[in-house]
Amino acid sequence: MQDQLNKKTFHLPLCNLDNGETFLDKRNSSVLVLPNANPEQTWYKGEISDQRGSLQTQYIDAKEQGFGERKLWVYTPPDFNPKKKEAYKLMVITDGGTYTTLMKPHLDRQQKKNPMLRDTVIAFVGNVREGSVKYHPVNLVEGISKDDTDHRQYEFLDHSEEFYAAVIAPTIERLRQDPTLHLSNKAEDTILTGFSLGGHFAAEAGLAHPENIGNVICLSGAFNTSIKSLGTQLKESNRKHGLNIFMSIGQLETLRQTPDNQAKYSVTAETRLEANQRFFEELQRNGHNVEFISLPSGHNELSTIHVITDQALPFVCANKPYTKDEHSELLQPSEKKLLEARERMQNFRAMSHKAPDLTASQDEIKKDDSSITPFTTTAKPSGIN
């Protein structure tokens, strides 16, 4: 939404899923620039790259297995060459419709900056086409709800192993066998990515099938679900595979549901932030190579786009702990800057209410609200190659 008094505006580049072309959104949105923001930050420049990759639309039919029909969008970089010596890596991203719309323009813009993208083919697996499934998840009958949330829970949680076997594994195999894509068939060159429920699914699938998936990217993973725990998969996962897992979480994902809502939404008493921290520690104890970062954001896909290209991809491609650079500084301010911002906010609140100065000391702020303290933790256990 545009602020009529704000001259700094942008039109977000989006992808037309029907023809693969990039366009600028008609909505004119306003930009709020904070005093200490990096002036070179380029999230919302509203630019369309001159060099554009190709987007091919395919279809996945899993009606016989009970998972209906869905689209598959395959992105190849601008200089894609199926005859090059080294095979391309494959990244598979669930919730493909949302991520293709947002990411295709971003991928085009990042090609010059990120050479790893030029060696990666990205497949976006769409959500189920309405009307193509016979099952009736809760709250999705007779047109009561047109939201795909119930479909996602059905596929990513309730029947995740069946969904992997019917949709994800065949898709990976089909793309690997396509001579026009020249993809590696190695697990170490295959990356499964998911957001929220999709992040939980990506972790579960990677732990269960490290022979096929060597790398997982979990974006705000729904590890506070009460529907299932990944404890069994962690215990049974084979340490010798050394699964690479990259996790990100928003620092504002601190909502703790009431007991009634815990039952209603099938979540535990943990916040999403706490659940991700716990799962990260469990992964470490089980010998996986894991990187975990927090972002100054909430629960939304847009904030994860740069994470995928600038942080997660370098981590999984390097097969070693990620080294922070200028990109991570943009996404994750230092603890000092966050605390200073918290102090300014407390001062502002005190002045706006004409109350005495309620600004806390740095130590008190840390103690009062640890959720704003960013954590970037990397540890590769000994013995993992």
Image (cartoon, rainbow, N blue to C red):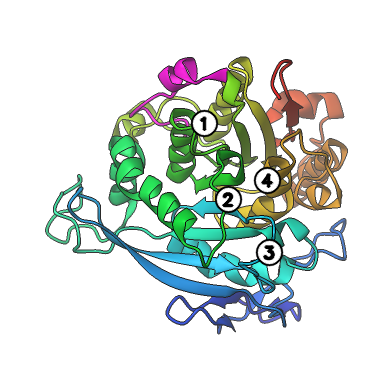
x, y percentage for residue 58?
Answer: 39, 68
Magenta run includes residue 302 = no
Provide residue 335's location: percent of width, then percent of height: 83, 36
Mark found first going from the N terminus, 2 or 4: 2
Mark 3 surroundings within 10 Å by alpha-carbon count, few (fewer than 14), some (14 through 19), many (20 or more):
few
Number of callouts: 4
Question: Can residue 369 be spotted in the picture?
Answer: no
Tell us which disc is closer to us: 1 or 2.
2
Q: In this view, does 259 lie above or below 307?
A: above
Q: What residue type is labelled 4?
A: Ala
Mark 1 residue type? Thr
Q: Distance between the residues labelled 1 and 4?
A: 23 Å
Q: Name the residue under label 3.
A: 84
Element under label 1? loop
Q: Nearer the viewer, residue 368 or 309?
A: 309
At a point 61% along the width and 39% down the height, the residue shown is 188
Taking the image as shown, residue 25 lies to the left or right of residue 266, namely right
The residue drawn where x is 74% and y is 28% is 378
Q: Mark 2 points at which residue?
A: 184
Disc 3 or disc 1, which is closer to the eye?
3
Using the image, tell me which numbered label, if any, was put on residue 271: 1
Secondary element under disc 3, as helix, strand or loop, is loop
> Hey, what amino acid is under mark 2?
Ser
